[in-house]
Amino acid sequence: MAEHGSSACSHPSERKYKIALCQLFVSKNKLENIRHARELLEAAADGGAKLILLPEMWNCPYSNELFSLFAEEIDADDLSGSPSCGMLAEVSRSRKVTLVGGSIPERFGSHLYSTCCVFGSNGKLRARHRKVHLFDVDIPGQLTFKESATLTAGDELTIVDTDVGLLGIGICHDIRFPELAILCAERGADVICYLAAFEMNTGPLFWEVLQKARALDNQLYVATCSPARDLTINHAAWGHSTVVGP
């Protein structure tokens, strides 16, 4: 379903806040994707959410052939080259919310990354996470996909201090690796946000159990946000955006 859900998280100070997960359909029209995302973000903020997540590749269909066409350059001091991030900055500032901006294809020099930008409630870019663990898989007769054919892996852990606490950031396949979550917990993260487009083969097998494992083992909240399921495309998302408690 193309809608957002909400849940309550509790900061260590015991101050509760509402989190929204914007599970939206993604089309081949970037401007339409940006418009749709903006509508859901503003609706979530108007509904009282203080932390809002978008999914992996929310402005771009999940396709190696399209990542380059939809890619944007992200300059923290001048977002004019990134209409997607420009919109996120405007909404976070106007609604005074923290946005974990899913991921979009980022062009940096000759490289493409799957990049999540986190915006503070003042509209400033607070952090940038580039997907560390790329998804390369070959299941004969079921699924073949190689992100590394077009994307470059990031090499940094991302923990960002926000109005709602310390957030760890991961993108999709990053959730399969417990070390990233352990390091986030050791460095004080209250919530780990995973933006993911798990597909219809891996979703039923791993999606829920991995979220519960990361939350339980590290005694923190895990929030995940997926695109909405569209069975007309090759890489249909499993969906099931979720918040899991410690």
Image (cartoon, grey):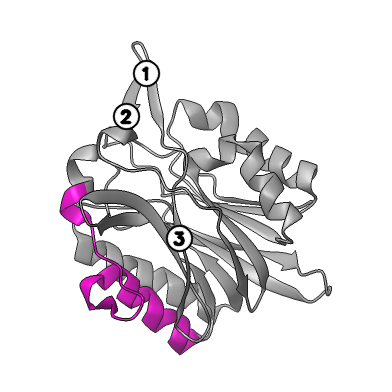
Q: Which residue is mark 3?
A: 54
81 in magenta: yes
In this rendering, the label closer to the viewer, 3 or 2: 2
Which is nearer the N-term, disc 3 or disc 2? 3
Q: Which residue is mark 1?
A: 138
The disc label shown at residue 69, or none:
none
Q: Would you say the residues marked 3 and 2 are in contact, meaning their CB atoms lie under 8 Å apart?
A: no
Q: Could you tell me which residue is drawn at 36 percent across and 66 percent down?
A: 37
Which segment is the magenta one?
68-95
Query: Where residue 36 sits in the image (x, y, percent)?
Result: 32, 66
Q: Could you tell me which residue is drawn at 46 percent across and 80 percent down?
A: 92
Q: Is residue 246 left or right of residue 234?
A: right
Q: Which residue is mark 2?
A: 146
| Quadrant in the picture for residue 81 | bottom left
User: Spatial distance from mark 3 to mark 2, Cα to Cα?
Assistant: 23 Å
Q: Is residue 60 left or right of residue 53?
A: left
Q: Amino acid at mark 1?
A: Asp
| Quadrant in the picture for residue 235 | top left
Neighbour tally class for label 2: few under 14, some 14-19, many 20 plus, Cα within 10 Å: some
Which is nearer the N-term, disc 2 or disc 1? 1
Neighbour tally class for label 3: few under 14, some 14-19, many 20 plus, Cα within 10 Å: many
Q: Would you say the residues marked 2 and 1 are in contact, meaning their CB atoms lie under 8 Å apart?
A: yes
